[in-house]
Image (tube, rainbow, N blue to C red):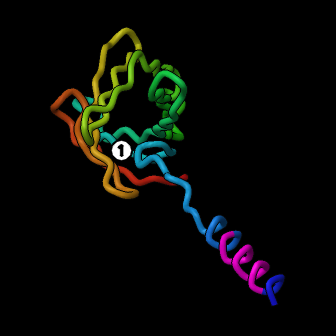
Amino acid sequence: MKKLIGSFILLIFAACGTQKKAIVDPFVGVYDMTVFEVTQIGDIPLKLIIKKDKVGYVSEIETNSQDPAASEYLWEVTSTSIDEDIIYIDATIANYDLSFELNVDDNDISGSMMGMFDVKGIRVK
């Protein structure tokens, strides 16, 4: 009887130990987003990749367009930081400095580029 009770208690502890949920970072992921109504360009589809490393957050921006002229220039992210619930990204493209302020709400991302152009998107991974 003691062995049965001991085995039962061990089984309960083992089952409870496997029920733990991994904490998921709400900012890390891959986002398809669009910068709307950029002067003389129109809408710009982008892919934003946010990762976390030992120091903090890092991000990459890729052109998500089929237009060969749009993919001619590479986006270079110079800094990524998070203050409360806002992601701040500084980047350059074709020697122009750009900045993003983005909010993540579950799988949706929204905000602005340069404080002038609306940005909206969704998490794809």
Residue type indicated by callout 1: Thr
Where does the image place residue 113, in percent across and percent down from the top left?
25, 32
Res. 37 visible in picture: no
Locate residue 6 relative to residue 70 in the image: left or right: right
Where does the image place residue 30, in percent across and percent down from the top left?
51, 45
Identify the residue at horizontal 54%, vertical 28% (top origin).
Answer: 53
Residue 96 is a magenta residue: no
Identify the residue at horizontal 23%, vertical 37% (top origin).
Answer: 112
Residue sitting at the far top: 95
Q: Which residues are magenta?
A: 5-13
Residue sitting at the far front: 2
Res. 116 visible in picture: yes
Residue annotated with mark 1: 34
Magenta portion: prevailing SS class:
helix
Locate residue 26 relative to residue 103 in the image: left or right: right
Mark 1 residue element: strand
User: Dividing the image into 4 quarters, which one contains the N terminus?
Assistant: bottom right
